[in-house]
Amino acid sequence: MYNSPRNVQSCRFEEVMMSRRRTLNVCLFGALASSLFALPAAAQDTDSEEDVRPEMKEMLEDDEGSEARGIVVSDNFPGEDDEEPAGWTVEFFGYLRTQYTAIQDDPNLEEFGRNDGFIIADARFGFLGYLDNGLGFELEVDAGVPRPTEEANTAIGEVVTRLRDGYVFYQPHPLFRASAGQFKVPFDIEELLSTANILFVERSVGSRGVEGVEGPNREGLSVGRQVGVRIDSDPFFFVTEDDGPGVSYALAATNGQSANRSLNDNDQAAFYGRVNLHWGEIARLGGGAYYNDRTIGELPDLIGETQTGWTADLTVAAAGFSLLANVVQVEFEPPEEVGAEPARTGLSYQAQVAYEEPFFGLQPAYRFAYLDPDTDREGAEAGIRFESLTYHTVGLNYNAKTYPLRLMLNYTITAEEQLEIDNDRFDALVQVEW
Ligand SMILES: [Ca+2]
Ligand SMILES: [Ca+2]
Ligand SMILES: [Ca+2]
């Protein structure tokens, strides 16, 4: 599996608290290396080499073989006076993903597949900051977010900058981290994976749904970022420090609506929970559930809807092989007094497999993904709005061995239960991460 220092639910506490010095000097090596190699003039101007204290130089030399990326700015070395409180250690990280997408032109439906071309998929950068006492923050921004268009007959919107993660945390112990702000809610595994680490150009149809130019619009069943509070943990391993059986958990109470909204949609909080069973870094069996009383629409036509979801998943990564399988089910229930729209059950599942060969970093991959917006309505009764979709994606990735570079090629065959349309797609993507 493609390795990144910013993996989902990584041993961040360990990174932050237990191996502080290692993390720090590794990252400092990155910072020093980039200033020496990329900006030699600037490096000379700031005399950065001379500024490095002897103990730091030692550590830099120790860690030359490390895989760490990112740049760390640190004020964390104790001063001459040991009473002086330690300052912030701040990691700067991010990634840039540029995509090319071509979608088949359906001969009958002219609104789909006529926008083939280049997309700034993600222009992400962020900061992770922490103090010795467990207090920290994560701030992450994406400058490649399409703003939904308000014009009815065009799918082309402006690309804008939006906050992604923005939360304060306090982690006094590996088994307890409390966070407040905007974060990914602990629910489905595919959404919790960093975009820089997913095996395909786009997340699965069950997670992301179908967007405007790709086919009739469908909502996916994943839950993204929301604003609220969260308690979670690093994996706790029962036998050894980082191998064998382990467990981790996460609980959250949020506003229950998508990120970057100024207020709650109502007076109610939404509740999320997730538990993972781990086997070292090799396998993770997880499950989660949520409850959310939503209020949708605009005054005076507000509509209530109760959403109840559950998910289960398995991820395995060993000897170049990786596997991800998950299922998500969500009940959408209108209040009893509103009889217009019946309750429905949305279901999605998928299986992804990939193998990265050890010589060049080539990684063929395959994904089967299924989305049914309403499991109770089949065939003609489902209509176009609630028909099920089955997508097959084949991919070939190149994960460069010595650079944080990925190239990805995908072809997706799209099968619709009711309205068969020609909208198979080809995606190519280049990604750098730092
Ligand atoms: Ca096209
Ligand atoms: Ca709410
Ligand atoms: Ca199709």
Image: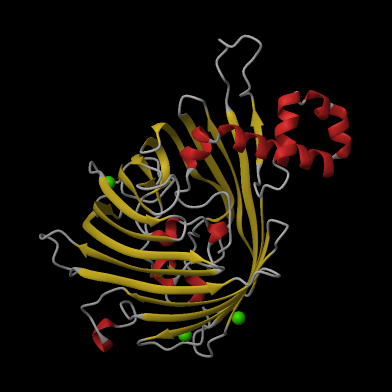
Is residue 402 rendered to the left or right of residue 116?
Answer: right
Is residue 150 rendered to the left or right of residue 158?
Answer: left
Q: Position of residue 166 (x, y in %)?
A: 48, 39
Q: Nearer the viewer, residue 333 or 237?
A: 237
Relative to 333, residue 350 above or below: below
Question: Taking the image as drawn, is residue 363 in sight?
Answer: yes
Q: Nearer the viewer, residue 96 or 236?
A: 236
Who's the residue at 42% across and 64% down the image? 315
Is residue 100 rendered to the left or right of residue 231?
Answer: right
Who's the residue at 76% across and 24% down the image? 54
* Farthest residue, direction left: 337
Q: Position of residue 287 (x, y in %)?
A: 30, 59
Is residue 270 rendered to the left or right of residue 121?
Answer: left
Q: Position of residue 68 (x, y in %)?
A: 64, 46
Who's the residue at 59% across and 30% down the image? 89
Relative to 289, residue 413 above or below: below
